[in-house]
Each structure stands twice: as C-alpha cells, then as structure tokens.
Image (cartoon, rainbow, N blue to C red):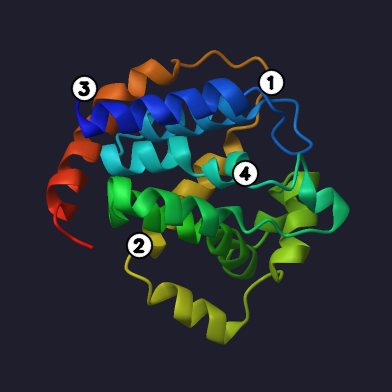
Amino acid sequence: MTEAAEAWDEIQALYAQSGTRRYGLQSVSQLEHALQSAALAARQGEDDEMVVASLLHDIGHMVHRLGDAPAERGIDDRHEAIGAKRLVRQFGHGVSEPVRLHVAAKRYLCAVEPGYAALLSPDSVRSLALQGGAMDDEERASFEAEPFWREAVRLRRYDEAAKVAGLEVPGIEAYASRARRLLSQAGSATRGVP
C-alpha cells in the first residue's frame, strides 16, 4: 500500500470513528457537515485542493480532546490551527492554509460584509465571540496579506452553508481520488525533508 493510500485510509477511519459526532449544536454530524462542504465546493468547480480543504476543514474538531461543542462551555478549541498542522505535511499549503484561515475568514466577513453576521448559526455566533469577533482595520489588512485569504473566504461560505439536516450528497469515497492525488504530490515534494 502506498503512503498516500495509507494516509487516506487513516482519514477515512477518523471519520468512521468520530464523524458521527454532532457538529457543534447543529442537527448534522461532523461527517455530514464535511461532505456538504465538499459537495458545495465541487459544485462550484473548485480545484482538488479546495474540494479537499472543504472536506477536511474541521478535522481539528475530531482530533482535539475537548469533547463536543467546546464553544458552549466558553472554550475556543483552535480547531483551525490543529487541523492545518495535521494537514500541511500530508497535503501541502493549498489544503492546509484555507483550513488554517477559515475561522479568520468568518471574522473578516463579519467586518467587511454587511449582514453576514446575521446569517451565522447560533453556534457560529458563540464561537465568533471566543475567536475575537469581527476584525478591526489592522486585522483585515493582515488577513488580506495572506496568500490564501481568498480561498479561505470561499471555504468559509461553503462551511456556513453546509449545515442542512438530511441533505443528500456524495459520500466520502467520492473524494478519494482527489485526496490520494494530492497526498501523492505532497509526499513526493516532502520526501527527504526533516
């Protein structure tokens, strides 16, 4: 079995083990949310990196040990940083950076887009307060200087829309070839890197 196939199998096993957990206070599971996000990205014609980033953007929620809905208990789980750290070596920056920045993108959109905050789910509103609220001018400029800020904003939009109970979307196997291709490319690029 190749390294890419093993890495993909580990991701699928993580979703099989933890994906049935409720996504925050929503009526969808972690897996349903991930699949809806990826389906939205694919429907918009996004490239493999963005589709896989959309699928895996909340993987940090499934690997931390803070339990379900830590925001409800006043805890910012920093899932975006946890997830990006896990994904960068496996997939590269095209996947990990939009994941790392998707929480900042929520803060950014609240600052620059009138009415965006009113569209947030109650769970997103609660976590927004823990994450620092809407960005100020300096934070916005810093965010816009990030190489993957536009991708993060698009990912954020898929994230917010991917909370529909009972929505039928393709299963995780629909993304296997995209993920394995990226895993193989990143593996080739990082071989021999300490």
Q: Which mark is residue 165?
A: 1
Q: CA distance from mark 1 to mark 4?
A: 19 Å
Circle 3 or circle 4, nearest the eye = 3
Circle 2 or circle 3, nearest the eye = 3
Nearer-N-terminus badge (3/4): 3
Circle 1 or circle 4, nearest the eye = 4
Quarter of the figure that contains the N terminus: top left
Residue drawn at (65%, 14%) of the image: 166
Neighbour tally class for label 3: few under 14, some 14-19, many 20 plus, Cα within 10 Å: few
Residue drawn at (23%, 39%) of the image: 182
Amino acid type indicated by mark 3: Met
Tell me the residue that label 3 is attached to: 1
Amino acid type indicated by mark 4: His
Which element type, helix, strand or loop, lies under badge 1?
A: loop
Nearer-N-terminus badge (1/4): 4
Can the viewer see residue 153 in this picture? no
Tell me the residue that label 4 is attached to: 61
Which element type, helix, strand or loop, lies under badge 2?
A: loop
Q: How many circles with numbers are drawn on the protein?
A: 4
Relative depth, front residue between 146 and 1: 1
Compared to residue 146, the image places residue 168 above or below, namely: above
Q: Residue 77 sits in which quadrant? A: bottom right
Tell me the residue that label 2 is attached to: 148
